Amino acid sequence: MITSLDGRIQQKNWALEDSDDIYEKQAAKIPWDAWIVGRVTMQGFTDTKPRPARRGKFRVPPGDFVAAYDQKTFAIGIDPHGKLKFKTNHADTEHIISVVTERATAEHLDYLRSKNVSYIIGGKRDIDLQLVVRKIAKLFPIKRLSLQGGGKVNGSFLKAGLIDELQLLLMPLADGTIGTPTLFDAEEGYTRRRAVHFRLRSCRAQSNGALLLRYQAIGARR
């Protein structure tokens, strides 16, 4: 992830012309089988045109759906209510997996099947991330998952205790915008939930004054 000194996720007012290149250069060095993001981030890989609602009754087999694919890596989008409209079944070179809940309609699941998009039922009313990662490992050849934001999905994984490692590009700027997403947005206000502690494994200065920080979650397997 890329953040400002005050922990904000990248905004347009940062005026960083090479931020995408910086991010991709570092991300390419991390071996992963799949990346996972929330619905808002995944919208960048979907069809923005309204999809006409189809009438009639739709019956789909219960449970998860693994579509045919020939890609070696995967793009996973968390979409609890089933709102995303995919143009194809791949994002860049990754096969798409949509994570929905039982609230997603049969019409939407039928639509995903028609696009050859795989999907996982990740809970009844809310996403159960422990269940989701178990299904991902069972149904697909995925052993290393790259979590790439935004703040809410990062916070959800943090709260669920599912983060092993953090690689952070800390940019030499302060945002100061109140109410914008931070690196981890788990819940509002003060809680009794204990913070997750990390151990610094490496720190490297970048040519633009940024720092590349690599942390291991304390208690996580190496």
Image (cartoon, helix red, strand yellow):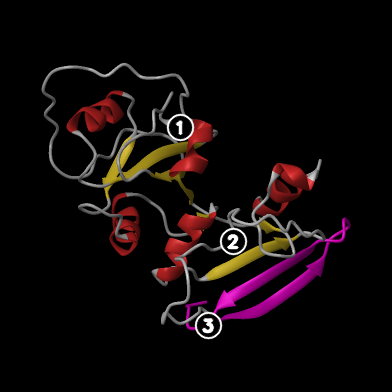
Label 1: how many Cα within 10 Å (few below 14, some 14–19, many 20+): many
Quadrant location of the N terminus? Answer: bottom right
Q: Are marks 3 and 1 in contact (CB under 8 Å)?
A: no
Q: What amino acid is found at the position of numbered circle 1 in the picture?
A: His
Tell me which amino acid carries mark 3: Ile
- Write down the region rendered in magenta: 197-222
Residue 166 position (above or below residue 75): below
Vertical placement of residue 25 versus 185, above or below: above
Q: Secondary structure at mark 1?
A: strand
Q: Alpha carbon of mark 3 to alpha carbon of mark 2: how far? A: 18 Å
Confirm whether residue 145 shows in the render. Answer: no
- Closer mark to the observer between disc 3 and disc 2: 2
- x%, y% of residue 9? 64, 54
Task: Determine whether, in the image, residue 169 is placed left or right of residue 45.
Answer: right
Marks 2 and 1: which is nearer the front? 2
**Is 219 placed left or right of 81 in the picture?**
right
The residue drawn where x is 24% and y is 39% is: 104
Nearer to us of marks 3 and 1 is: 3
Residue 203 in magenta stretch: yes
Number of numbered discs on residues: 3
Q: Is residue 83 visible?
A: yes
Residue kind at label 2, given as amino acid type: Leu
Mark on residue 183? Answer: 2
Vertical side of 198 occupied by 103: above or below: above
Instruction: Give the residue number, with chain letter if any, for mark 3.
Output: 218
Q: What separation in Å lies between label 2 and label 1 (alpha carbons)?
A: 27 Å
Residue 74, image x and y in percent? 45, 43
Q: Residue at x 41, y 34 (%)?
A: 70
Q: Dot 1 corresponds to which residue?
A: 90
* Relative image position of residue 214 (x, y in whole percent): 67, 70
Could you say which is closer to the camera, residue 176 or residue 116? 176
Q: Are marks 3 and 2 in contact (CB under 8 Å)?
A: no
